[in-house]
Image (cartoon, rainbow, N blue to C red):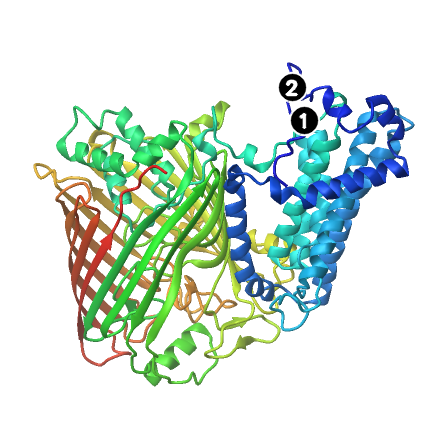
């Protein structure tokens, strides 16, 4: 269904697009004669035959420009085919829920088709030819899309989610791929939205079509890939019918094919260009944060990361506007120069270059040796290595090798980062440790005492597809997040655990400002997401008590959703509010009702519907010392809409950042501290924070703690100083102390770490970074005597320079 070459669109002053007069004559009949035949059976059969011929021969008219949407569409479809079974199995199987969604999808299609039919019929007594044409074209589009979708359905024979073993096998006599409901809905919606291109008609049409898609998936009638392909087929078929038969003089607007819509010519803005997120462990973030601390950037949102490459380029450009490249201290010039070189390609995109290309981001290998017993469970005891994407490690030799890269096409982006990881085995936890975990978390007793198996696996870290429109990026896949200004670990979201599965994220990638009095809110960024956990084994659903089994993950896994808004009230002051909610899992189906009740803390007759957390954070640069001192803080509360009105029932952490030390401009210093210790341990055995009586596996993903570096029920302090050899290369020294509350862990415990690190970049794109960390810990429940370990890591990476494509 490439662009229809039979018709040209020439703009006119009244914004209605008219084809040349000969375009009607080319169909073999004058315009008035054709009008007289419209609605007759011969004309219907003639149009249908021509439409079908045009649809089935459309692959022969595909052009190179169509790759800008065909390649991302193929990639997204392939990704959904891989994840179809897992996602469908995570949905509710309750008969009432399935019937509810089936009714919604039937009602949605019926409403759209009835709208088209009603406009056609009402067009006769009202003599409104525009209504009649809209109804007629909608009917033609639906008929053609149903013929095509039914042909594919019976040819491909894919089983539906409730058939066979639920894996959606093809050529097994099923009728799942593609979805005819989706095809019909998007056919009608597309015609209505282009015949009447106002905001309200488009909102009605596309919302109804999207509701049909959602309902077909959650009613377990189709897999996500079925619905996506059906929707695209319906939309493209409607576009073909519309462009061949619509009369511009009656109204409506031109319907551009995807290749034309995505073409970046003339005034195409970078606001609608797909851009990959910069990895959270990149050198870019500390460089931009230091440049902002010096006062050269005023619109960064440190409390809401990651940032896209285009946003990093915008921040770098802002620093240039504040003369960071000249008449500034040497360390500022170095930071600005390195960032400008890194984002040179993005500067070209901001100037109107075409956003089509691919890039290998990095290739790396890390070796890690640990002598002595490390800590690996920050949910209960402690953790030796922090913010490492949940990578496995044990005493002995650990290794990983991986790589990352991305491709962009117009507003689309595909990013992937994967690695092969290996870690040695470890002895089984002691019976005392297992008993403590079972008791404090409310798990079944008699947990099996099994050795920890060696790890040898390939794993995707961040891997997602995204689309950007008007600085809003919608992405789906495995995605990391960091919500807060703290460096050692934010309270709600860090990269200490691996990314959530099947995360749908909506992100305002560039700050915006509201008009009128709301402009005093400053620059605003918003991010919302919905993702799925992995590794949760138990859930207390209230009626049956704790359900689950050791060594077997729940089916389906619970869901985590959240949203955060950050206000840059002034160039020196940033303030953010956030909320996350855990819900779903066995006995708690994910529906619109449970989503609303859980996200907003609505509890019906005492029913447990979710585990909510809220957070607030701020960052403030001292105005008279804005070139080098920043202090920041975070607060978190359980089951409260915000920690601000409930400060006595919240936990806190904060810090000071000295971007430079007086008379030593190459050295910075960061001091952090806080406490996650609960106020009262008599109410819940696990305390108030990072644990819940319903979701007893806590705030973890695949066994790794997702919150603050302090862990659960502990207080601690850290100090880190860095000597900046250049904008990218540096040497660091860090000290951490942590103490576990005795009310939580019998006899309490302590942990002390001292680490020295080096991160060296070469001009050729090679990166060498290593660290040496010595740790001592005393946790009587795990070992009677004080333990120590030494962790030595070395990583070699290659980061090729990003070039134009």
- Within 10 Å of disc 1 (Cα), the crowding (few <14, some 14-19, many 20+) is many
Residue 403 on image: x %, y %:
32, 56
Asked if residue 775 lies left or right of residue 486, the reply is left
Q: Is residue 724 above or below residue 553?
A: above
Residue 259 in view in this figure: yes
Circle 2 residue: 15
Against 109, residue 132 (above or below) is: above
Q: Decide which of 79, 115 is in the foreground and name it.
A: 79
Work out whether residue 347 or residue 453 is closer to the camera in this orientation and state it. Answer: 347
Q: Is residue 326 left or right of residue 139?
A: left
Residue at point 39%, 48% (across, down): 406
Mark 2–mark 1 CB contact (< 8 Å): yes
Determine whether the residue tagged by mark 2 lies in a helix, strand or loop. Answer: loop
Secondary structure of the residue carrying numbered label 1: loop
Query: CA separation, marks 2 and 1?
Result: 8 Å
Q: Residue furthest left?
A: 663
How far across and how far down the image is residue 733, in percent? 14, 54
């Amino acid at each position: 269904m490439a662009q229809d070459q039979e018709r040209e669109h020439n703009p006119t002053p009244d914004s209605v697009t008219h084809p040349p007069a000969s375009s009607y004559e080319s169909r073999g009949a004058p315009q008035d004669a054709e009008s007289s035949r419209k609605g007759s059976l011969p004309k219907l059969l003639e149009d249908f035959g021509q439409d079908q011929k045009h649809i089935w021969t459309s692959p022969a008219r595909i052009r190179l420009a169509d790759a800008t949407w065909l390649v991302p569409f193929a990639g997204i479809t392939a990704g959904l085919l891989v994840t179809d079974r897992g996602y469908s199995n995570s949905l509710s199987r309750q008969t009432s829920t399935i019937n509810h969604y089936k009714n919604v999808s039937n009602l949605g299609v019926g409403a759209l088709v009835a709208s088209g039919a009603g406009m056609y019929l009402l067009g006769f007594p009202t003599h409104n030819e525009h209504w009649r044409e809209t109804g007629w074209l909608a009917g033609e589009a639906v008929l053609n899309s149903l013929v095509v979708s039914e042909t594919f359905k019976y040819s491909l024979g894919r089983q539906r989610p409730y058939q066979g073993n639920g894996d959606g096998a093809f050529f097994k006599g099923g009728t799942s791929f593609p979805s005819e409901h989706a095809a019909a809905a998007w056919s009608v919606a597309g015609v209505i939205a282009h015949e009447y291109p106002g905001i309200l008609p488009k909102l009605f049409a596309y919302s109804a079509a999207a509701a049909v898609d959602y309902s077909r998936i959650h009613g377990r009638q189709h897999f996500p890939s079925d619905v996506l392909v059906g929707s695209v087929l319906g939309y493209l078929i409607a576009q073909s019918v519309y462009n061949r038969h619509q009369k511009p003089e009656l109204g409506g607007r031109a319907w551009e094919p995807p290749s034309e819509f995505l073409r970046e010519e003339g005034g195409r803005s970078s606001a609608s260009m797909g851009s990959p997120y910069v990895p959270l462990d990149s050198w870019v973030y500390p460089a931009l944060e230091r440049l902002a601390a010096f006062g050269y950037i005023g619109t960064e949102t440190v409390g809401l990361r990651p940032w896209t490459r285009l946003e990093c380029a915008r921040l770098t450009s802002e620093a240039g506007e504040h003369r960071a490249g000249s008449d500034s201290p040497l360390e500022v010039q170095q930071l600005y120069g390195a960032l400008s070189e890194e984002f040179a390609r993005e500067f070209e995109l901001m100037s109107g270059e075409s956003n089509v290309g691919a890039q290998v981001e990095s290739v790396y290998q890390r070796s890690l040796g640990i002598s002595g017993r490390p800590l690996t469970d920050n949910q209960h005891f402690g953790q030796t290595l922090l913010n490492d994407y949940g990578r496995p490690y044990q005493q002995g030799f650990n290794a990983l090798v991986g790589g990352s890269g991305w491709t962009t096409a117009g507003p689309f982006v595909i990013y992937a980062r994967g690695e092969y990881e290996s870690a040695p085995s470890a002895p089984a936890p002691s019976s005392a440790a297992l008993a403590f975990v079972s008791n404090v978390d409310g798990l079944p007793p008699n947990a099996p005492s099994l050795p920890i198996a060696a790890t040898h696996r390939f794993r995707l870290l961040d891997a997602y597809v995204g689309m950007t429109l008007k600085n809003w990026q919608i992405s789906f896949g495995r995605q990391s997040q960091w919500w807060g200004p703290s460096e050692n670990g934010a309270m709600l979201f860090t990269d200490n655990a691996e990314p959530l599965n099947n995360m749908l994220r909506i992100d305002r990638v560039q700050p915006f400002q509201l008009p009128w009095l709301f402009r005093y809110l400053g620059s605003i960024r918003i991010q919302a997401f919905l993702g799925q956990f992995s590794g949760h084994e138990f859930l207390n659903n209230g009626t049956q008590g704790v359900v689950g089994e050791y060594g077997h993950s729940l089916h389906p896994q619970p869901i985590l959703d959240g949203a955060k808004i950050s206000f840059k009230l002034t160039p020196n002051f940033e303030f953010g509010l956030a909320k996350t909610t855990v819900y779903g899992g066995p006995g708690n189906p994910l529906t619109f009702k449970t989503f609303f009740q859980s996200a907003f803390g609505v509890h019906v007759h005492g029913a447990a519907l979710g585990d909510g957390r809220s957070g607030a954070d701020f960052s403030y640069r001292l105005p008279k010392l804005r070139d080098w001192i920043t202090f920041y803080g975070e607060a978190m509360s359980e089951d409260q809409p915000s920690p601000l009105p409930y400060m006595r029932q919240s936990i806190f952490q904060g810090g000071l950042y000295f971007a430079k030390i007086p008379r030593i401009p190459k050295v910075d210093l960061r001091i952090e501290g806080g406490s996650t210790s609960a106020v009262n341990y008599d109410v819940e055995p696990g305390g108030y924070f990072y644990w819940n009586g319903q979701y007893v596996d806590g705030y973890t993903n695949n066994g790794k703690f997702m919150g603050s570096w302090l862990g659960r029920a502990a207080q601690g302090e850290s100090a880190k100083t860095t000597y900046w050899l250049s904008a990218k290369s540096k040497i660091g020294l860090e000290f951490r102390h942590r103490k576990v509350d005795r009310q939580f862990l019998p006899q309490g415990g302590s942990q002390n770490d001292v680490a020295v690190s080096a991160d060296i970049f070469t001009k050729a794109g090679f990166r060498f970074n290593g660290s040496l960390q010595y740790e001592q810990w005393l946790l009587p429940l795990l070992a009677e005597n004080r333990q120590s370990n030494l962790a030595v890591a070395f990583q070699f990476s290659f980061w090729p320079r990003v070039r134009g494509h």
